[in-house]
Amino acid sequence: MTTDYSPSELMAVAGSRELKDGQVVAVGLGLPVVASFLAKQTHAPNMTILFELGVVDPEPVDSGVGLADPRVWYRAKVLSSFVDILGTVLHKGRVDVGFLGGLEVDQYGNLNTTLVGDPRGKFRHMVGSGGANDIASCANKTVIIIRHEARKLKETISFITSPGYISGGSARADLNMRGGPERVITDKAIFGFHPETKRMQLLSIHPGNSLEDVLGTMGFKPEISGSIPFTEPPTREQLRLIREQIDPTRMYMG
């Protein structure tokens, strides 16, 4: 283990640990790219990576400038379409894990990427859903990666773009929706969801942060049960792979 790592590197490593060998994973832009390729190069070599625009299992040799950059598609097993990935694969329940990010997330894992502000008053439109709503609705589970700020971790969000556990409890199951969010990974902590209330539950705190640091930068108080451990730091090999092979230009790490 080492203490020489950034919060973004720890977030990517934590995300990779949520992935298992043999799974099918829908990956969005940013840290999920790093997390997914790290898992595939370490403990999950038989994992299948999907980009929503139709790319399956690429082997990029360059970080590129986004998922639409052909350098990221290098040696992909399939080059297909947005419709194929979302319709033929995702909507049929064949995606085990979907990685999601957003502007805001609430205590039940609902995500907003549509607008900021009050839709009945002053607000600002943002990027919107893309494939995020489909992934949140149809993947067998989702992992959310988001910065730890009170303006992002809110009790109530401005708009629900991608559903989590809706209003908690059995609300999602009552709508006959599979899956739901399993983890929220921030630059200060890792959260799960309480099995009954479906409210966000603190699982671990990243080294260098305290419980007060975590709670003081949230818009709500998560469920807390017992003593909270520290998150396992990255290994030297995980950091080497991120820095030398997966994101040497710091496109995603910043």
Image (cartoon, rainbow, N blue to C red):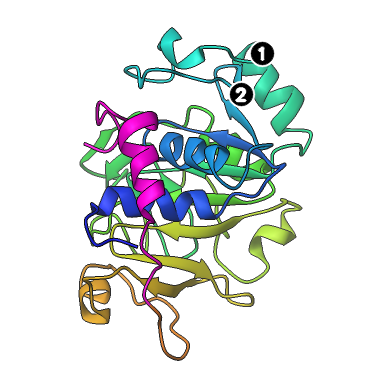
State whether residue 159 appears in this view.
Answer: no
Residue 72 spot, x, y in % from top left: 45, 16
Q: Secondary structure at mark 1?
A: strand
Q: Would you name the residue on which mark 2 appears?
A: 57
Q: Position of residue 225 (x, y in %)?
A: 47, 87
Other residues around mark 2 within 10 Å, as few (<14) / some (14–19) / many (≥20): many
Residue at image position (69%, 48%) is: 140
Residue 250 magenta-highlighted: yes
Is 49 or 42 nearer to us in this picture? 42
Image quarter (top left, top right, bottom left or bottom right) of the C terminus:
top left
Q: Identity of the amino acid at label 1?
A: Val
Quarter in which the N terminus is drawn: bottom left
Q: Nearer the viewer, residue 31 or 91?
A: 31
Q: Kindly give the residue lying farthest to the right in the view shown.
A: 92
Instruction: First in sequence, mark 2 or 1: give its number.
Output: 2
Above or below 190: residue 212: below
Q: Quadrant of residue 35?
A: top left
**Highlighted range, magenta:** 230-254
Tell me the residue at 66%/23% (across/down): 85
Q: Are marks 2 and 1 in contact (CB under 8 Å)?
A: yes
Is residue 67 shown above or below 1?
above
Q: Residue 25 at what x, y percent from top left?
A: 62, 38
Residue plotted at (76% across, 36% down): 94
Q: Which residue is nearer to you in this view: 177 or 181?
A: 181
Q: Which secondary structure, mark 2?
A: loop
Against 97, is 206 above or below? below
- Disc 2/disc 1 C-alpha distance (Å): 7 Å
Give the percent coordinates (x, y) of residue 95. Answer: 69, 38
Q: Residue furthest bottom?
A: 226
- The residue type indicated by label 2 comes to Asp
The residue at which mark 1 appears reads as: 78
Residue 178: give its label: none
